[in-house]
């Protein structure tokens, strides 16, 4: 199993269709990265969200990435209608690429059942062509979870801290019937089992370059 160190990630672009997508999918990765790489540069890109939801997103980013150098591109395109705004979404992503040339990009998975997520999954790698892109997963009633090929093991305290911060950061979502500890920790436990860890987050990577340096 190939292992990569978080200390090698100096900058990150995190792309989400909706406020809370990034933290649900990769909150453990964010917490681990912030602890391993103080001052990491992170650019948040969200395609949809009301003013209240965008405020939640800003607070969540600060909570999940303490000490990070944060910047934001928060947009209010219509939820559930991103495919009808294909050109605008493309420009949003190109603008993000102009802000930061990251070591890592996070975005949704191509097999995600939500149309907004799928569009970002399709467009992000075409904009960040020479960057490492990890496609994240979000549990939902559609039942679209699939086999993944990249895992980020999480310490027990990180997995539980992620869930605590999800509840604290997104009070607008607490009424949803799927928003609970069992969903978040259950998926993390399953992905952890798949990589011989207690907890983990899972991603897809379709292309990466391995540079071998002489010692």
Image (cartoon, rainbow, N blue to C red):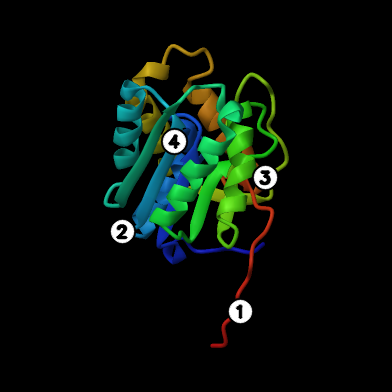
Q: Quadrant of residue 186?
A: top right
Alpha carbon distance from label 3 to label 1: 28 Å
> Tags 3 and 4 in contact by the CB under 8 Å rule?
no
Which residue in the protein does label 2 denote?
38
Identify the element where label 2 is drawn. Answer: loop
Res 163 seen here: yes
2 or 3: tag closer to the N-terminus: 2
Q: Nearer the viewer, mark 4 or mark 1?
A: 4
* Residue 151 drawn above or below residue 48: below
4 or 1: tag closer to the N-terminus: 4
3 or 4: tag closer to the N-terminus: 4
Alpha carbon distance from label 4 to label 2: 23 Å
Alpha carbon distance from label 2 to label 1: 26 Å
> Tags 2 and 3 in contact by the CB under 8 Å rule?
no
Q: Residues within 10 Å of mark 4 (few under 14, many from 20)?
A: many
Furthest-left residue in this view:
67
């Amino acid at each position: 199993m190939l292992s990569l160190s978080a200390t090698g990630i100096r900058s990150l672009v995190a792309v989400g269709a909706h406020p809370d997508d990034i933290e649900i999918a990769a909150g453990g990765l964010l917490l681990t990265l912030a602890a391993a790489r103080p001052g990491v540069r992170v650019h948040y890109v969200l395609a949809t969200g009301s003013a209240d939801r965008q405020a939640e997103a800003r607070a969540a980013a600060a909570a999940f990435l303490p000490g990070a150098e944060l910047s934001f591109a928060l947009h209010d395109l219509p939820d559930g209608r991103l495919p009808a705004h294909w050109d605008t979404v493309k420009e949003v992503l190109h603008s993000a690429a102009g802000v930061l040339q990251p070591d890592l990009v996070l975005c949704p998975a191509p097999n995600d059942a939500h149309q907004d997520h799928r569009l970002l999954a399709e467009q992000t790698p075409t904009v960040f062509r020479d960057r490492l892109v990890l496609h994240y997963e979000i549990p939902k009633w559609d039942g679209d979870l699939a086999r993944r090929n990249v895992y980020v093991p999480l310490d027990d305290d990180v997995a539980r801290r992620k869930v605590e911060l999800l509840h604290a950061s997104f009070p607008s979502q607490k009424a949803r019937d799927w928003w609970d500890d069992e969903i978040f920790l259950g998926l993390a436990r399953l992905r952890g089992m798949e990589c011989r860890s207690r907890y983990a987050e899972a991603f897809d990577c379709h292309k990466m370059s391995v540079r071998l340096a002489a010692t």
